[in-house]
Amino acid sequence: MSSEEKIQPCKCGYEGALLGTDHGAFYSLQCPECSESVEAFTVRGLGEAWNKAQQGKEQGAGE
């Protein structure tokens, strides 16, 4: 990537920092220009979601 190219974190073309919030189990990011938002699990949150899903499968199999 050349020095003239910039990474644009949002598809609207905004070049600044995104607004981020740590929700514990996941992060959310929002573009201050267009308000587009995304969410992603943290490592801890991914493990919690996986374990919860597996427990649900095990309980459903026993019925």
Image (tube, rainbow, N blue to C red):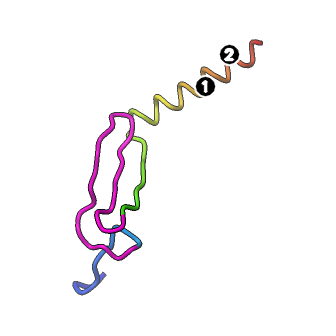
- Give coordinates of residue 30: x percent, y percent: 34, 57
Q: Quadrant of the N terminus?
A: bottom left
Please state if 52 lies on the left or on the right of 3 as rendered: right
Write down the quadrant of residue 27 in the picture: top left
Q: Residues within 10 Å of mark 1 (few under 14, many from 20)?
A: few
- Give coordinates of residue 25: x percent, y percent: 38, 34
- Residue at the extreme front: 34
Q: Residue at x 27, y 60 (%)?
A: 18
Q: Quadrant of the C terminus?
A: top right
Q: Residue at x 67, y 18 (%)?
A: 58
Q: Amino acid at mark 1?
A: Gln
Total count of labels: 2
Stretch of the chain drawn in magenta: 12-34
- Give coordinates of residue 39: x percent, y percent: 42, 49
Report the predominant secondary structure element of the magenta stretch: loop
Q: Residue at x 33, y 73 (%)?
A: 8
For mark 2, give the secondary structure: helix
Q: Which residue in the structure is indicated by mark 1?
A: 54
Q: Is residue 57 above or below residue 19?
A: above
Q: Is residue 14 above or below residue 40?
A: below
- Residue at the extreme top: 63
Please state if 11 lies on the left or on the right of 61 as rendered: left
Q: Residues within 10 Å of mark 2 (few under 14, many from 20)?
A: few
Mark number displayed over residue 59: 2
Residue 18 painted magenta: yes
Q: Nearer the viewer, residue 29 or 34?
A: 34
Q: Nearer the viewer, residue 53 or 32?
A: 32
Q: Amino acid at mark 2?
A: Gln
Residue 50 painted magenta: no
Write down the quadrant of residue 31 in the picture: bottom left
Q: Is residue 62 above or below residue 51?
A: above
First of labels 2, 1 by sequence position: 1
